[in-house]
Amino acid sequence: MVDGTPGFDQRVWEAVMLVPAGRLATYGQIAEWIGAYGCARQVGWALRRLPLPSEVPWHRIVNARGCISLSPSREGSDWMQRQLLIGEGIPVDEQGRLPLRRYLWRPPPPAV
């Protein structure tokens, strides 16, 4: 935190904490919510920096194609993500695909 302003990672984590159980958001949505349009990849990196286990529901964030980003560099966290989502009632197939449109969360508009 610099000058009382939370850093990028902290802003990402705070936004992800708002996504309710059984719902999904995309990396790009999180970037937009924190005012970092076009920084979806950086949102993913911020989530990868979370120490596990974490209270931040990182597993609810998926790519815009409606898939878990599968990669050997994730060291098994992709399969952990799959199991956590299934545990919340979100179906995920063996290739990491899920029904994003059906489970996508959109926060209520800010009060004016």
Image: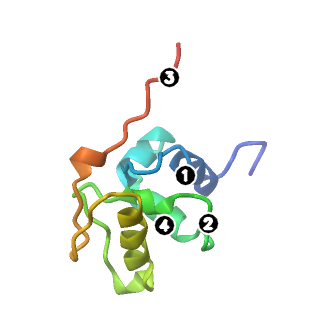
Q: Quadrant of residue 81?
A: bottom left
Cα gap from disc 4 to disc 2, whole angstroms:
15 Å
Left or right: where 64 falls relative to 35: left
**Which of marks 3 and 4 precedes in the sequence?**
4
Check disc 3 and report the residue beneath it.
110
Return the residue nearer the eye: 87 or 69.
87
Question: How far across and how far down the image is residue 89, in percent?
Answer: 35, 57
**Which of marks 2 and 3 precedes in the sequence?**
2
In percent of the image, x 58 and y 54: which residue is there?
Answer: 13
Mark 2 residue type: Ser
Which label number is shown at residue 12?
1
Cα gap from disc 3 to disc 2, whole angstroms:
27 Å
In the picture as drawn, the residue positioned furthest to the top comes out as: 112
Q: Nearer the viewer, mark 1 or mark 2?
A: 2
Question: How many C-alpha atoms fall within 10 Å of the one at disc 4: few (<14), some, or many (≥20)?
Answer: few
Check disc 4 and report the residue beneath it.
45
**Which of marks 1 and 4 precedes in the sequence?**
1
